[in-house]
Image (cartoon, grey):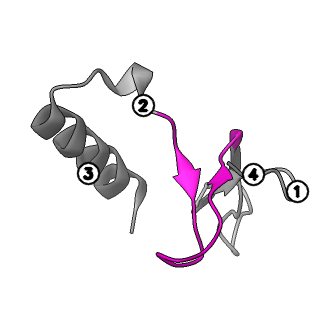
Amino acid sequence: MNAQQLINRIQKMCDHHGVDPRKVDINYRHSNNSDVYMVKHVWEDLYDAESNSILTSISLVTFGGETR
């Protein structure tokens, strides 16, 4: 999944349910039956190998075992 696909999917879900995206939390799960982890930040992750200056990925960060 790329960043635009994530943005589009979030917007589509919020539109479908009639909610403002600013009022929807982002959580993380390893699978449908695993614990829910609250995403606290989005960080720059990796950069291109050639120049190390072009962002190629981001990470959703949960900060340790804080579950919901």
**Seen in the image, is 40 located left or right of residue 28?**
right
Residue numbers of the magenta segment: 25-41
Of all residues, the one furthest to the right in this rendering is 64
Residue 58, image quadrant: bottom right
**Amino acid at circle 4:** Thr
User: Dot 2 corresponds to which residue?
Assistant: 24
Tell me the kind of residue under disc 3: Arg
| Residue depth check, mark 1 versus mark 3: number of the one nearer the observer | 1
- Name the residue tied to disc 4: 62
| Mark found first going from the N terminus, 1 or 3 | 3
Q: CA distance from mark 1 to mark 3?
A: 26 Å
Residue located beneath label 1 in the image: 64
Identify the residue position indicated by label 3 in the image. 9
- Res 54 → quadrant: bottom right
- Residue at the spot 74% in from the left edge and 62% down from the top edge: 52
| C-alpha span from label 3 to label 2 | 13 Å
Element type at mark 1: loop
Report x, y in % for residue 53. Answer: 70, 54
Image spot of residue 27 (x, y percent)? 56, 50
Q: CA distance from mark 4 to mark 2?
A: 16 Å
Which of marks 2 and 3 precedes in the sequence?
A: 3
Residue type, numbered disc 2 = Val
Mark 1 and mark 4 in contact (Cβ < 8 Å)? yes
